[in-house]
Image: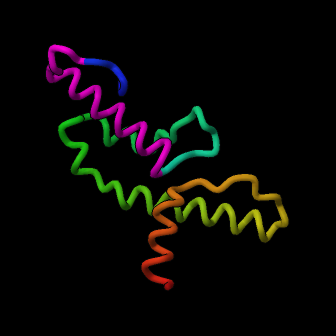
Amino acid sequence: MVTKQYPNGMDKVEMDRFKVVFVVFVVGTFLAPTPKYNAVNPDFWGALIKPDEINQFNWIAYVVEHIIHATARVQEDMHSKCEVSNITGCSLLIQVLYLTFIL
């Protein structure tokens, strides 16, 4: 859907589909990825029911909450001496926050 060509333009249904697919792609692969490369966390799908209202969902709060949960999982694994094989969450956002507030 993201790479589909629209030589005659998009109608309302196609625009709505594109919005939903684009948000799932960006959130699932960049902002709040999961450890599985082919799975997307369904927690935010409720925000996609009405594509015209996607911009009203608090995406930053969702991403920050995802990072907080990922951090808690990593801390639990480290305290229990488990091997940490992956870290989920938007690593770019973590780096920006670190560079902004720590340095």
Majority secondary structure of magenta residues: helix
Residue 41 location, x and y as percent?
51, 41
> Is residue 13 rendered magenta in the image?
yes
- Give residue 81's quadrant in the image: bottom right
Residue 97 location, x and y as percent?
45, 73
In this view, 98 is above or below 4:
below
Please state which of residues 72 and 37 is positioned toward the viewer in this rendering.
37
Q: Is residue 38 left or right of residue 30?
A: right
In this view, 12 is above or below 49:
above
Q: Is residue 45 left or right of residue 49?
A: right
Please state which of residues 4 and 81 is positioned toward the viewer in this rendering.
4
Judging from the image, the colouring scheme is: rainbow
Residue placed at 63% from the left, 66% from the top?
72
Q: Quadrant of the N terminus?
A: top left
In this view, 27 is above or below 4:
below
- Give residue 87's quadrant in the image: bottom right
Residue placed at 60% from the left, 37% from the top?
37
Q: Which residues are magenta?
A: 6-31
Residue 65 location, x and y as percent?
47, 61
Residue placed at 32% from the left, 33% from the top?
20
